[in-house]
Image (cartoon, helix red, strand yellow):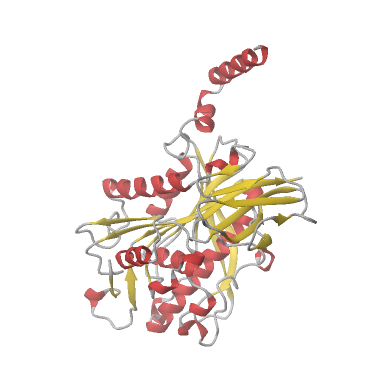
Amino acid sequence: MYNMRLYSIFWTVLCLLFPGILLAQWGNRYADPVFESILTTSGIPFSSAVKEGQTSPTTLYLDFYEPSEDTLSARPLVITVFGGAYVTGSRDWSDMVEYCTRFAEHGYVAASIDYRLLPITSLNSSTIIRSAYMAAQDVNSAIRFLKAHCNEYRIDTSNIFLLGNSAGSIAILNEIFMSNEERPSQTFVSPDLGPMNSCGYDEYAGFSSKVAGAVSQWGGVLDVEVIDLDEYVPLCLIHGTEDNAVPYDSGFCYSNLSLSIFPYMYGSHAIANHLSDLGIEDYEFHPFEGEEHCFYITAFTNLIEDKFDACFHIARDFLYNHLDTHLTTGVSHYETDNVKIYPNPASDVLFVEVKGGERVANITLCDMQGRIVKECDASPVFLDRLPSGVYAVHVKTSDGRKFIQKVVVK
């Protein structure tokens, strides 16, 4: 009783002295804007890579947005990737700035990133494909860089999401789903562009590029078959039904221009159908009837407020529903209808149990920088020689479901 009285007094004093901070830390964070002041750090170099047609590397930068009065030690991250057909665009375009600012107001941290652009004089059917792949490599580099610096930027590496616009959406879909065997033939032409994770600074090569989910706005893929169960992460697909730049279903990009240099692609409607055919239920598809490409912004990059609001609310709710909020609860084990992981803390061995007739297909342990430290295909997981610390346990079940839990190794 005495301890409860002290707790009540302590809570009352905090509420009186620091109402704004407490609202942010303990209020409806992530669902509503709870921060008013946002701190932006611009021009952080995250990668160096060679552009198409050049021989010397170009430095790529990101801008980092965070709540200025935040006290959490690990925050979910949203990485935004601008559009512009790989020949134009910028990390400080109005929609990227607005997305990052709003997510920071909701308690996330956000990063708007560069990627390598193609000189318009070099535009042809081959260089477009190569530039799309380069952009995906640059997204990959940004993820690894931010995981490497997760302590500095206070990032929860189990809660990293991607959000793209047009070419940026194509880049993030390629980054997530395209294996080296699925690379377009154009990427092997000299100079060979290499695997997805072959760009960026060498010191970040060992970090994982895994993410928790992605929001694709009017994006697409060259072949829906690149998306399979083994590498699937939850997707939120937003697309206008009258899009001529990136097809709503399938067709040639910029079909209204009658130019033969743009590739045939499969848009959000075709991707959603493919996900349904695979039996995947954890995705969202939001068609906007009668809308064209990038419908929330004018040709002069001014936002159309009501249309941008609609897209932001979709993205916000999707991320909120996919946050692994249990990771910070400190419970002794994590249990759903399917998976139980215990004990936590653990010392010598970790057990993973699957219910309902399913089985464990894969168990991966990552450190807080995203580096894979142990991987196996069955329980138990023996933790011998593993340094003490906090780890993320990624579990994939036989029916394709995925679960993540943080565990403490003593």
On screen, residue 142 versus residue 165, left or right, reads right
On screen, residue 384 versus residue 339, left or right, reads right
On screen, residue 5 versus residue 294, left or right, reads right
Observer able to see residue 157 = no
- The vertical placement of 23 against 284, above or below, is above
Q: Quadrant of residue 250?
A: bottom left
Which residue, as the protein is rendered here, is positioned at the far left?
290
- The vertical placement of 236 against 410, above or below, is below
Residue 305: give x, y in percent of width and height.
Answer: 29, 46
Residue occupying image coordinates x 58% and y 56%: 395
Residue toward you, 170 or 284: 284
Residue toward you, 6 or 94: 6
- The vertical placement of 159 against 267, above or below, is above
User: From the image, which quarter does the N terminus lie in?
Assistant: top right
Residue occupying image coordinates x 22% and y 74%: 256
Which residue, as the protein is rendered here, is positioned at the far front?
357
Residue toward you, 296 or 11: 11
Residue 135: give x, y in percent of width and height.
Answer: 48, 69
Residue occupying image coordinates x 53% and y 70%: 137
Numbered marks: total: 0
Which residue, as the protein is rendered here, is positioned at the far right?
385
Observer able to see residue 48 = yes
Residue 232: give x, y in percent of width and height.
Answer: 47, 63
User: From the image, which quarter does the C terminus lie in?
Assistant: top right
Residue 308: give x, y in percent of width and height.
Answer: 31, 49
